[in-house]
Amino acid sequence: MRDERLTKLARVLVNYSVAAEEGDQVVLAGGAAAEPLIKAVYARLLDIGATPIPQVALPGMQEVFFEHARDVHYEKTPPVIRAIYEGADAFISVMAPTNTRALANVDPAKQQALGKRDKDLQEIVLGKDRWALTLFPTEALAQESEMGLAEYEEFVFEAMALGEEDPVRYWSEKAGEQGRLIERLEQGREVRIHGPETDLTLSITGRKFLNGDGKKNMPCGEVFTGPVEDSANGHVYFGVPVAVGGREVSGVRLRFEDGKVVEASAEKGEEYLNSMLDADVGARYLGELGIGTNYGIPRATKNILFDEKLGGTVHLAIGRSYAATGGKNDSSVHWDLICDLRDGGELYLDGELVEQNGSFLDFDFA
């Protein structure tokens, strides 16, 4: 796919998202199907004098790993890979699956074991704070979203604001809008999420909200924090389905007592849900509360990168907190589940209604 918007996206990722400079060593990872974007980012990194370190995965390699890997392969991250991550200055990752259900029959325990093995790599990336995750539109993602490829490409680029003359300016202005919302939220102590089959309260006392303004995810458009670990009480329904680990999980219901998930069910994918909750102690506690502000995303597509940013939704992640928010929960899991407030939902801050039916009462993110 030849598209000038890929050149724009490369500039956004390199110059804005990770702010790469001359002399930086940047890990550039992605699937082979993202070849046009990977080449555009590769060229942009070279243009500014950075050193790209490409790590391109062929289709089917994950399946081969899970079929053939022995116990020793789950014990520790290969030292050479760890050395690359420790030596890199920044990271750009491009998701480009050619089969979103490729891992559907892989034992979740194996997936969790690999996640636990590479948990330190995640901490290295998060600690350096110069990373960006994006997506390249593939036939598989278009099918998952129930769109043709051309339609899906337009959907993706619109969500990333690549139709704008200057996408960097757009995301910079978005950061300012969201900054004002953060100022309001950080004055509060308790959040209540209320809606169909949902009434959940949690504390944000002393926690910091982070600005999802395109410097970590593209597309972006969210503000998020780590709720106080033992504060969640009540029940919540996540009506937005997600494709995760090669499976579809939908209709998730969770009940919390003193921060812990004590009851869980799903209309589809319940076995996988329970396997995630049982991965470790921290997986039954919340690591994130996020509020979506990207109204350029018109509907859900079963892809968390996009759906958690949907304007008019909130998402809660079970598992690991981001330390920068003040969150303390530790887990090998970080899984976002999305609650749609656009039809009868409400968000309260210290008892005051701040969002109703997906629209903020005092802020305009249209």
Image (cartoon, grey):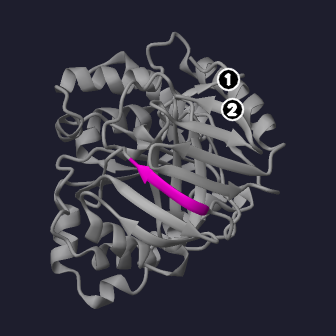
On the image, numbered disc 1 is attached to which residue?
A: 361
Q: Secondary structure at mark 2?
A: strand
The answer to which of 281 and 55 lies nearer the viewer is 281
Q: Position of residue 67 (x, y in %)?
A: 15, 76
Residues at discs 1 and 2 in contact (Cβ within 8 Å): yes
Residue 142 appears in the rendering: yes
Q: Position of residue 117 (x, y in %)?
A: 43, 78
The answer to which of 80 and 361 lies nearer the viewer is 361
Q: Label 2 neighbourhood size at 10 Å, few (<14), some (14-19), many (20+)?
A: some
The magenta stretch spans residue 79: no
Q: Secondary structure at mark 1?
A: loop
The mark found on residue 222 in the picture is none
Q: Quadrant of residue 143?
A: top left
- For the stretch drawn in magenta, the main secondary structure is strand
Give the position of the N terminus as an image quadrant.
top left
> Which residue: 80% across, 45% down?
188
Q: Which residue occupies the extreme bottom position in the image?
A: 71
Alpha carbons under labels 1 and 2: distance apart: 6 Å
The three-letter amino acid code for the residue at tag 1 is Leu
In the image: residue 102, left or right of residue 256? left
Q: Does residue 34 lie above or below 324 as drawn?
A: above
The mark found on residue 354 in the picture is 2
Q: Label 1 neighbourhood size at 10 Å, few (<14), some (14-19), many (20+)?
A: few
How many marks overall? 2
The part of the chain drawn in magenta is 233-238
> Which residue: 39% across, 19% down?
5
Q: Does residue 242 lie above or below 155 as drawn?
A: below
Q: Does residue 121 lie above or below 293 as drawn?
A: below
The magenta stretch spans residue 237: yes
Q: Position of residue 132 (x, y in %)?
A: 52, 44
